[in-house]
Structures are given as structure tokens and as C-alpha cells.
Amino acid sequence: MENTMISKWFLRIQNTTPISRRHKLAGVVTVEGVPASRLVVVFDRGTLTRVSSVQSSRIDGKWEISGLKEYPEKSLIVIAIDPTGGTHNAKIADFVSQIGPPAPPVEETVTE
């Protein structure tokens, strides 16, 4: 196996670039100001490939998609689709950016 390194502490198989699936998208779906359950679909704007989908909560309209790979800033499209067959138009958010993992805490050194 090419580029494989084995030690008693870890196993690394080529690709040396870590895969990060720690990004997320989240939001709230409302219809006429009232929280609503809708199918929320996320697409890559460059390829129009479906990234993921989820159903928003019928109680509070909240939805979240976690475990996304990192996409460039403003490269996603989010569509909330009305399942009732024509009562409301789909809602679209374009040029969306996902949230990355929180930055590690910064240690401060105080000198006197």
C-alpha cells in the first residue's frame, strides 16, 4: 500500500490532507410568520449537486444539517419546499455560507 505509515500509535493511509466534516448549516422555516415543517434541500451552486436535505421541525421550524465538508464562502443554495402542492412558493436562500467549527480558545499570558 503506497504512502502508508504504521506505528504503535496510529495508522495513516494516504491522503495526507485531513477530511473535515465539521461544518453545519441551520435555520428556521416560517410561512407567513408561523413556524413550518418543510423539506430543506442544500445544493452546491457551482455544480447544482445536492449536498444534503432535512425536514424542518413542525413545532418551531428549526432545521440543522451537520457534518458537512467545507465549501467556499457563499457557494451554497438552500431551498425550503412546500409539500402541499402549490399553496406556497418555495423559499430560496442563495449565496449561503456554512458555519465552521469553533476556534480553539486563545490562551493569554499576563506579564507584570
Image (spheres, rainbow, N blue to C red):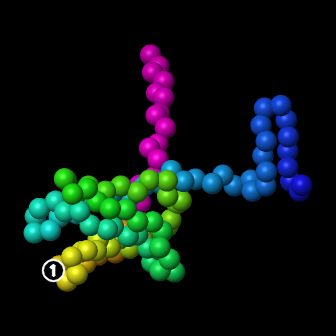
| Residue 91 seen in this snapshot | no
Q: Give the prevailing secondary structure in the magenta stretch.
A: loop
In the picture, measured across the screen, residue 31 lies left or right of residue 94, that is left
In the picture, measured across the screen, residue 27 lies left or right of residue 59, that is right
Instruction: Looking at this view, name the residue that lies furthest to the front.
Output: 84
Residue 110 falls in which quadrant of the image? top left
Magenta highlight on residue 100: yes
Q: Which image quarter is the N terminus in?
A: bottom right
Magenta highlight on residue 28: no
In the picture, measured across the screen, residue 10 lies left or right of residue 21, that is right
Q: Who's the residue at 19% across and 53% down the image? A: 60
In the picture, measured across the screen, residue 87 lies left or right of residue 103, that is left
Q: Which image quarter is the C terminus in?
A: top left
Considering depth in this image, is 24 or 82 the residue closer to the camera?
82
Query: Disc 1 designates what residue?
Result: 87
Considering depth in this image, is 36 or 22 the residue closer to the camera?
36
Q: Who's the residue at 19% across and 63% down the image? A: 36
Q: Position of residue 93 (x, y in %)?
A: 30, 72
- Give the residues drawn in magenta, as a range: 98-112
